[in-house]
Image (spheres, helix red, strand yellow):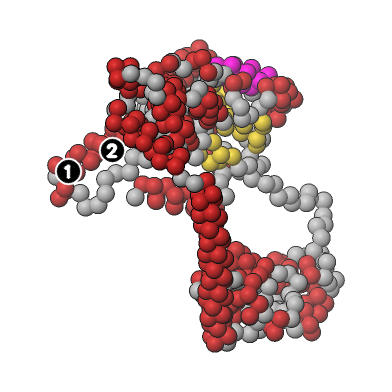
Amino acid sequence: MSYNKYSKELKESVVSRILGGEESVSDIGRDTGINLNTLYRWRDNAQRTGLSATTKYKKAENWRTEDKFLVVIETANLNEIEFSEYCRKKGLYPEQVKEWKEACMQANGVSTEKISKVNQELKQEKKANEKLQKELTRKEKALAEAAALLVPRKKGQCDLGSGQRGRLISAQDREKAVELISEAVKSGARLFKACERLGIHKRTYNRWVLDGIVDRRTTCVRPEPKNKLSKEEEKKVLDVVNTEEFSSLAPSQIVPILADRGTYIASESTIYNILKRNQELEHRGRSRKPEKRPISIHKADKPCQVWTWDITYLNGPIKGQYYYLYLILDMFSRKIVGWEIWKEESANHASELITKAYVQEKIALNIRPLVLHSDNGSPMKGATMLETLYNLGIIPSRSRPRVSNDNPYSESLFKTLKYRPNYQPKGFDTIGEARLWVQQFVKWYNYEHKHSGLKFISPNERHLGLDKEIFAKRTKVYEEAKSRNPERWAGSIRNWKLNDEVWLNPERNQATEDGKAHEAAAS
């Protein structure tokens, strides 16, 4: 805000608080919402104006020495009536001014040389005390560290490889070392000294603490497992699978054939691992090599950040004739932000619908680009559709092939739609009749339906940000009911809090952490 936008009364009140000395400028800025640069400018201007500004805001006992001296000078030549008027205007008592005048006179009588000598002696004594304090602190730390370093020496029974680089240290010894070093550091030892006492580097200790005590290095020498096949047994497996009889078969077929003959050489997974180590597991045949596609993961913490959409069939007047419902859903609020029905699937229709929804929801005002998630149908990947998305600045996102679970919000909405009591499973006679029915459904779903995934508020209420107010009222009702009849409540009241983050296909660890955080917030 500009300087001229604040009223004179507000400015005087704020400057009074700044010069009062009881609050910091940062605290006043957070309290009033005024920029810190503006507050500092007001303070500097008030201080530059001298006594007239300073005395206006500060209490008399909080005045600076310069202001008190200035009052003494200004009242030196005033008569009794003028002196009294001056004190009333400045908010002072005459006794205070007389006391300041006497203090000034006494100060002038003190010898300048004496004051200088005393100050010099105090400064030297202060330096000597600081030096002694530093030395005492250093010695106390050294004694504490020496005592703390005795702990790893006395209790350190773990084998850490005698400082040899690249050696394998067991998980038990690692855990013991971390425990001893942590105990020494808490007792006052420096971390690198405690690590040095046990013969490991500080970075090694930090890696054990952050990544866990399990050795994750792929280059370290590990003891061979007891159930590992010997080299002779592995060679026998390779000789069997490479015989003319089995050369064209996969291990999944070789193992049952050998079992029918009363022979067992290894499990399927072991044979696959042996072939892989010997580089004999390359893809062969006319089929396309399997390709692992990454899963699409998105997060939304407010409306119009992630949309999902899909197309579903609506039965027509005769068997085999369908109308196609295009439907766009906001992932955060579950609100239907766009829909239309056409007689065919087309990228042109999809492009038209997304443009319409984009304008209605004012996505152009978003700072964060919109993500539009869908499956891999031809209308979703059509050139016209992709060109429209790029022109609107929308990021396309698609599910993995033949994995309907990657688009769960749209699939769930279609089930809600087709299980409505007044849905027409036998078909709609005309496309106009189908559009009228979907229009009524969308109105009911957005504004009346209490969504179970939203703690039973409507999608429109979530979209407009009214959920916190509604949940606060529900919580108050439950708390009042519990206070009236506490014996009817075995535990806490119902949780009316809704997670502020909505994920599409979250990773397993992320979903677990979000669930725990949500449970902790509710408890």
Q: Is residue 119 above or below residue 217?
A: above
Mark before the other along the chain sequence, 2 or 1? 2
Q: Which residue is more in the foreground, 159 or 297?
A: 159
Residue 213, visible in the rendered structure? yes
- Give the secondary structure at mark 2: helix
- Residue where numbered disc 2 is placed: 475
Mark 1 residue type? Ser
Q: Which residue is more in the foreground, 353 or 137?
A: 137
- Residue 64 figure quarter: top left
Q: Position of residue 298 (x, y in %)?
A: 59, 39
Q: Which residue is at a point 78% across and 49% down the rendered structure image?
A: 288
Q: Position of residue 33 (x, y in %)?
A: 46, 28
Q: Position of residue 19 (x, y in %)?
A: 43, 31
- Give the secondary structure at mark 1: helix
Q: Which residue is at a point 54% across and 36% down the rendered structure image?
A: 300
Calculate the distance from the C-alpha at mark 2 to the C-alpha at mark 1.
12 Å
Residue 349 is one of the magenta-drawn residues: yes
Q: Is residue 61 above or below residue 507?
A: above
Residue 172, visible in the rendered structure? no
The total of numbered circles placed on residues is 2
* Most distant residue in the right direction: 244
Q: Position of residue 80 (x, y in %)?
A: 30, 20
Q: Which residue is more in the foreground, 479 or 428?
A: 479
Write the start and end of the magenta stretch as one range: 348-360
- Residue where numbered disc 1 is placed: 483
Mark 2 residue type? Thr
Give the numbered dot on residue 42. Answer: none
Q: Which residue is more in the foreground, 68 or 317?
A: 68
Give the dominant element type of the magenta stretch: helix, strand or loop. helix
Q: Which residue is at a point 18% across and 40% down the rendered structure image?
A: 481
Q: Is residue 420 above or below residue 342?
A: below
